[in-house]
């Protein structure tokens, strides 16, 4: 296998700036280090899990008419 294929960086078509409180930034740093991940990889993992949680638990609530009336003016 050619070494060029092994060294290609992953492409991420979307970039985002996060403004975190110091405590949260330190927690991200500590957990990412403990899991042997980069901060970016850890944040991507958290976002992926948050999206899945919303898909499974929060979005289904919007099918309930009473919930919709309570959250929308």
Image (cartoon, rainbow, N blue to C red):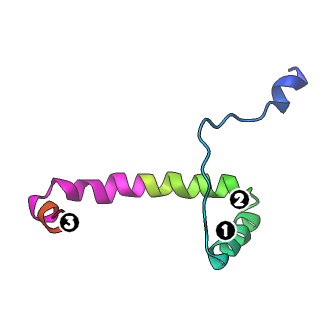
Relative to residue 6, is residue 66 depicted above or below?
Answer: below
Q: Which residues are magenta?
A: 52-67
Residue at mark 1: 28
Marks 2/1 in contact by CB < 8 Å: the verdict is yes
Residue 65, image x, y percentages:
10, 58
| Magenta stretch encompasses residue 61 | yes
Per the model, the C-alpha gap separating discs 2 and 1 is 7 Å
Disc 2 or 1, which lies upstream in sequence? 1
Q: Which mark is residue 39?
A: 2
For this rendering, which residue is in front, 17 or 49? 17
Q: How would you rate the neighbour count of disc 2 (Cα within 10 Å): few for under 14, some for 14-19, many for 20 or more?
A: some
Per the model, the C-alpha gap separating discs 2 and 3 is 34 Å
Quarter occupied by the N terminus? top right
Per the model, the C-alpha gap separating discs 3 and 1 is 31 Å
- In the image, which is nearer the foreground, mark 2 or mark 3? 3
Residue at mark 3: 71
Q: Give the quarter of the image for residue 67.
A: bottom left
Residue visible at 68% across and 34% down in the picture? 11
Q: In what element is the residue under mark 3?
A: helix
């Amino acid at each position: 296998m050619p070494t060029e294929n092994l060294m290609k960086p992953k492409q991420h078509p979307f970039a985002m700036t996060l403004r975190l409180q110091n405590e949260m930034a330190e927690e991200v740093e500590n957990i990412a280090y403990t899991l042997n991940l980069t901060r970016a990889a850890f944040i991507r993992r958290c976002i992926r899990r948050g999206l899945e949680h919303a898909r499974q638990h929060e979005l289904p609530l919007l099918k309930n008419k009473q919930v919709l009336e309570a959250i929308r003016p």
